[in-house]
Image (cartoon, rainbow, N blue to C red):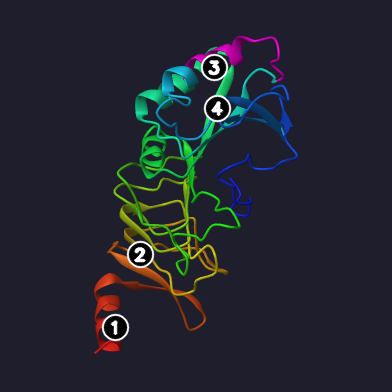
Amino acid sequence: MSLDSPPVNADIAPTEAATDAASPEVDPNVQVRFKSQAGKVLLLLPPEPSATLSPWPEVWEQLKHRLTAGERFWQSQSIVHLIARDRLLDSRQLQEIANALTDAQLQLKRVYTSRRQTAVAAATAGYAVEQHIPATPLNQASPQAGSSLDEPLYLQSTIRSGMEIRHNGTVVILGDINPGGSIVAAGDIVIWGRLKGLAHAGSQGNRRCRIMTLHMEPTQLRIADKVARPPETPPQAYLPEVAYIGEGGIRIAPAQDFSRWLTEQHA
């Protein structure tokens, strides 16, 4: 996945130019929708229900109906991006969606959500994930005014090749980032494991962000607008290290030395 792909508005598909497969009478707040975009299929779920509005059994029945209806427009084995918005989905519900899509010869690959629990469940299941905050109406004050970052996202999972995790805050991974996997965070990135894929901290331009890992062996490091690649000759031994922007670009220091330096700076 490209690191330069545009962010997703929580209340719409990735672009309004997408073709809606549903009829004009479909209410996006209560019904499941499908859209097509650049060879992909977008599956849009209605938002988190009220007491009587679009509970999961109703959403599930709508999804099965749309997958078997005559209005299908997709080709076999098309990639599906699930736009979950603020709907809470657990691992069982995600698996049900994936199985239904597979039966319709579709492949679920990516999940967009504003719910941390849904993001964790999707990442654990092996899907690329983008967690984002819901859009706020212009006439409504933002509850996060003055704050540019979401709360940290914690994942206990190995990020495999082809998986990408995006989050508008700090990301903490208890597991490895395999080659071909990537983490993109507006805040810091902390990996309690091996970093062998791509890590991009400070993705919105914050040069004070850092990347911390027990085993620093990335295919590429990015902090804000700076890019670094690993040395051609790997070290003889790997220690916990911190990547940060210093003089000349991205620098990497042993965690112990970096901690001592921080203590001296704030003494």
Between the residue at mark 1 and the residue at mark 2, the CA separation in whole angstroms equals 22 Å
Q: Mark 4 — residue?
A: 30
Q: Mark 3 — residue?
A: 62
Q: Mark 1 — residue?
A: 261
Of the pair 9 and 222, the residue shown nearer to us: 9
Residue at position x 55%, y 53% from top? 136
First in residue order: circle 4 vs circle 1: 4
First in residue order: circle 3 vs circle 4: 4
First in residue order: circle 2 vs circle 4: 4
- Mark 1 or 3: in front is 3
Between the residue at mark 4 and the residue at mark 1, the CA separation in whole angstroms equals 54 Å
Label 3 is placed on what type of residue? Gln
Of the pair 227 and 38, the residue shown nearer to us: 38
- SS of the residue at dot 1? helix
Residue 70 in magenta stretch: yes
| Relative image position of residue 36 (x, y in whole percent) | 70, 30
- Mark 3 or 4: in front is 4
Between the residue at mark 2 and the residue at mark 4, the CA separation in whole angstroms equals 56 Å
Are dots 1 and 2 in contact, CB under 8 Å? no
Of the pair 162 and 169, the residue shown nearer to us: 169
- Mark 2 or 4: in front is 4
Magenta residues span 60-73
